[in-house]
Amino acid sequence: MVNYYQYLPISEEDENWGLSVLNTGCTRIKSNEQYPYRHHPAHHYFNWQKGRILNEYQLIYIVGGEGVFESSSIGEKKVEEGSVIILFPDEWHRFKPNVNTGWDEYWVGFKGDVIDAIMKKNFFHREEALLPIGFHEEMIILLTEIMEQTKKEGPGYQPLISGAVLHLLGHTHSFTKQKVFENEGLLEITINKAIVLLRTRIDEHIAMQKIADELQVSYAWFRKMFKLYTGIAPQQYFIQLKIEKAKMLLGDPLKSVKEIAYDLKFESSFYFSKLFKEKVGLSPEQYKKKFITGI
């Protein structure tokens, strides 16, 4: 996970759409690390002693580590990995990771008439702002897509990412209703967590043994069950994730093949090019040319 955050300008046209994304990002907080970072804007920064009140909604997905959350409506609660925190406008709150574990978080802030209408229908409640939904690849895909679109800020990107926010809320509501933690078997929970871990570390060089260690299972069991569940071995799944991310990055005319290989932690640009051609049928240079020219 590469730490990233973006605070977005909102036009009158964006507001008229009915749902605007105000900010988004992801952060890996290591054990004993300061939280939150001081470089956030003053109206979003807070400390544990004072907490804060926002004039927006936020969805925060904790995919690793643990901590604590407290709000005016629910008091202090333990936050476990696989939890979503929903922040409400004008609601005092505070949260922080455990100093011994840190945590990995994704978030998106938003507001508008559309979300106000949804909240008035009681799909989400201030008294149930902490939702243990578990590990779901769909959530990471949507949050990552929102961040990627904010990096480009292309024409009409606000309605596009506001749709992703609605999708996130829909997934969160659905997973909560299904009582995922109560009904899923150990295998499904473990593999879903593994998939989330792999997606959040797509820009790292990580051994599958380390993933197995974090899941507290043997590597042999992990490899066998992951392949049984997904149809592909975990290392090959991880490579496929990297190749898909590389295909997206190759669409950026300012990024060289060497830079992309480095960003995704391939052993070398030569190895990256060789692997890419094996998986895609084109070299990165050929794919890049085809992406840009359409030929």
Image (cartoon, grey):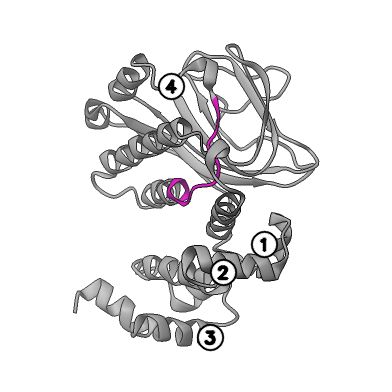
Question: Marks 3 and 1: CB-CB under 8 Å?
Answer: no
Q: Which residue is mark 2?
A: 234
Bounds of the magenta segment? 130-140
Question: Marks 2 and 1: CB-CB under 8 Å?
Answer: yes
Q: Quadrant of the C terminus?
A: bottom left
Q: Amino acid at mark 2?
A: Pro
Q: Amino acid at mark 3?
A: Tyr
Between marks 3 and 2, how big is the CA–CA gap? 19 Å
Quarter of the view holding residue 249? bottom left
Within 10 Å of the Cα at label 2, are there few (<14), some (14-19), or many (20+) other Cα atoms?
many
Between marks 2 and 1, how big is the CA–CA gap? 10 Å
Viewed as shown, does residue 278 lie left or right of 224? left
Between marks 2 and 4, how big is the CA–CA gap? 35 Å
Q: Which residue is mark 4?
A: 124
Q: Secondary structure at mark 4?
A: loop
- Could you tell which of marks 4 and 3 lies nearer the N-terminus? 4
Query: Residue at 61% of width from left, 65% of height from top?
Result: 204
- Could you tell which of marks 2 and 1 lies nearer the N-terminus? 1
Horizontal and vertical percent position of residue 132: 57, 34
Horizontal and vertical percent position of residue 163: 30, 39
Q: Which residue is mark 1?
A: 211
Q: Nearer the viewer, residue 109 or 130?
A: 130
Horizontal and vertical percent position of residue 87: 51, 24
Q: Amino acid at mark 4?
A: Phe
Within 10 Å of the Cα at label 3, are there few (<14), some (14-19), or many (20+) other Cα atoms?
few
Asked whether residue 222 is drawn in magenta, I would say no
Q: Amino acid at mark 1?
A: Ile
Given the current orientation, which residue lies at the most extreme left position? 295
Between marks 3 and 1, how big is the CA–CA gap? 23 Å
Q: Which residue is mark 3?
A: 271
